[in-house]
Image (cartoon, grey):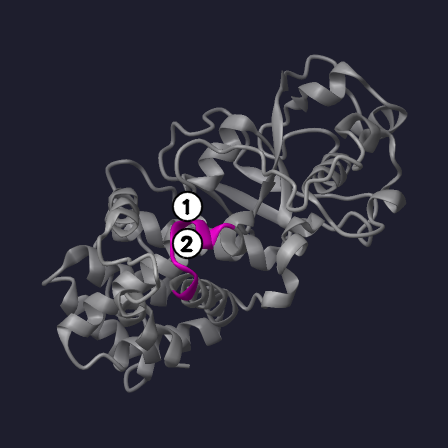
């Protein structure tokens, strides 16, 4: 059985929804009191109680743990805890978990004058860093940094190998006997976090929803809005080259990367099921030939993704996210004119206001 205290064991399909372990926090602290409430609440609602407890256990920052603790303590009734749990799912887990299959992101400001993918392949790193970031350029930069390979499987990108450029020959290294696969430029923090929200909800609710997501990023993960605003979501340190299957698993929180202590840029590949990416290395070390122009995947972004994945699986909420999303999108209470913003505000209001 998984013990959260270590946070370094592989989940299996039989350990989904893991009961909260004994209280690990010092007595007479806010964290201890908040965690005790979560443990008690799991007797009433196992999923919601565990989600609150694992939010507290898995927060990547100490300040994030304190914020979650204060949020839990601010709930005076069990109904408030349920609301808080649903709010956490809305602004943490739902945005981080893609629906359906992963697909390459479309450039945020697609324009016919932009160069083709093949032309970008031949461009220098310096040229690619000029002007606004957009997806195709960011994907090429990640490919060059990642030696034209999926960072998890080592497979070589098919499109790059089919029409090799001088840059490909320079970066790819030894290709003898190495399988090829189509790859995507995968975002660690999803590109849809600040795109397309208004397509799903009315403008008034969308603004509130987006504010909740960005608040969660900053207070829980220490990630500020200015880092990932607009096209900055396509920054190279928010990108990894992944095979199509690895990308799908990563986007759906089925796999995640946990930092290896005292080993910079080295991570353990964790799986919600040991069959995912079976046979590939458990340890991944990122390298770059140019830390300034081709920065490595950001440890804070990877830690945020990993925390969301652990929380989703250990609480058991991952089994309900899809249905919850459908319920929200189909709910008659989401009026097109935005008059029903209170429906969502009640789920996020306490969550956002307690800081």
Q: Nearer the viewer, mark 2 or mark 1?
A: 1
Residue 8 x %, y %: 42, 50
Q: Nearer the viewer, residue 146 or 278?
A: 146
Q: Quadrant of the C terminus?
A: bottom left
In the image, is 124 to the left or to the right of 347?
right
Q: Position of residue 92 (x, y in %)?
A: 40, 58
In magenta stretch: residue 95: no
The kind of secondary structure the magenta stretch mainly shows is helix
Magenta segment boundaries in residue numbering: 196-204
Whether residue 200 is in magenta: the answer is: yes
Q: Would you name the residue on which mark 2 appears?
A: 308
- At x 52% / y 36%, what residue is drawn? 282
Which quadrant holds residue 160? top right
- Asked if disc 2 and disc 1 are in contact, CB closer than 8 Å, the reply is yes
Count of labels shown? 2
Q: Is residue 20 visible?
A: no
Tag 1 residue: 97
Q: Residues within 10 Å of mark 1 (few under 14, many from 20)?
A: many
Q: CA distance from mark 2 to mark 1?
A: 9 Å
Residue drawn at x 31%, y 77% as measured from the top left = 350
At label 2, counting other C-alpha atoms closer than 10 Å, the crowd grade (few under 14, some 14-19, many 20 or more) is: many
Label 2 element class: helix
Q: Residue at x 77, y 52 (%)?
A: 132
């Amino acid at each position: 059985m998984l013990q959260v205290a270590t946070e370094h064991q592989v989940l299996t399909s039989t350990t989904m929804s893991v009961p909260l372990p004994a209280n690990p926090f010092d007595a007479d602290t806010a964290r201890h009191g908040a965690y005790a409430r979560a443990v008690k609440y799991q007797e009433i609602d196992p999923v919601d109680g565990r989600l609150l407890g694992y939010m507290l256990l898995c927060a990547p920052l100490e300040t994030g743990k304190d914020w979650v603790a204060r949020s839990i303590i601010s709930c005076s009734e069990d109904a408030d805890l349920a609301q808080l749990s649903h709010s956490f799912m809305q602004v943490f887990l739902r945005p981080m978990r893609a629906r359906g299959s992963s697909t390459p992101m479309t450039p945020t400001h697609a324009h016919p004058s932009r160069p083709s993918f093949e032309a970008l392949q031949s461009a220098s790193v310096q040229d690619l860093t000029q002007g606004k970031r957009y997806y195709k350029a960011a994907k090429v930069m990640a490919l060059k940094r990642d030696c034209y390979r999926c960072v998890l499987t080592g497979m070589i990108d098919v499109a790059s190998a089919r029409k090799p450029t001088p840059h490909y020959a320079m970066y790819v290294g030894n290709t003898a006997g190495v399988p090829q696969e189509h790859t995507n430029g995968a975002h660690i923090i999803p590109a849809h976090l600040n795109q397309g929200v208004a397509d799903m909800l009315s403008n008034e609710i969308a603004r509130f929803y987006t504010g909740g997501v960005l608040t969660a990023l900053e207070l829980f993960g220490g990630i500020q809005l200015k880092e990932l605003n607009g096209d900055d979501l396509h920054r190279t340190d928010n990108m990894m080259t992944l095979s199509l299957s690895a990308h799908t698993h990563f986007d759906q929180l089925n796999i995640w990367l946990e930092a290896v202590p005292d080993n910079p840029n080295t991570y353990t590949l964790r799986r919600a099921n040991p069959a995912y990416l079976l046979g590939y290395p458990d340890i991944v070390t990122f390298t770059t030939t140019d830390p300034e122009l081709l920065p490595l995947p950001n440890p804070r972004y990877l830690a945020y993704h990993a925390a969301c994945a652990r929380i989703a699986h250990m609480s058991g909420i991952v089994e309900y996210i899809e249905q919850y999303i459908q319920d929200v999108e189909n709910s008659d209470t989401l009026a097109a004119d935005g008059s029903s913003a209170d429906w969502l505000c009640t789920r996020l209001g306490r969550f956002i206001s307690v800081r």
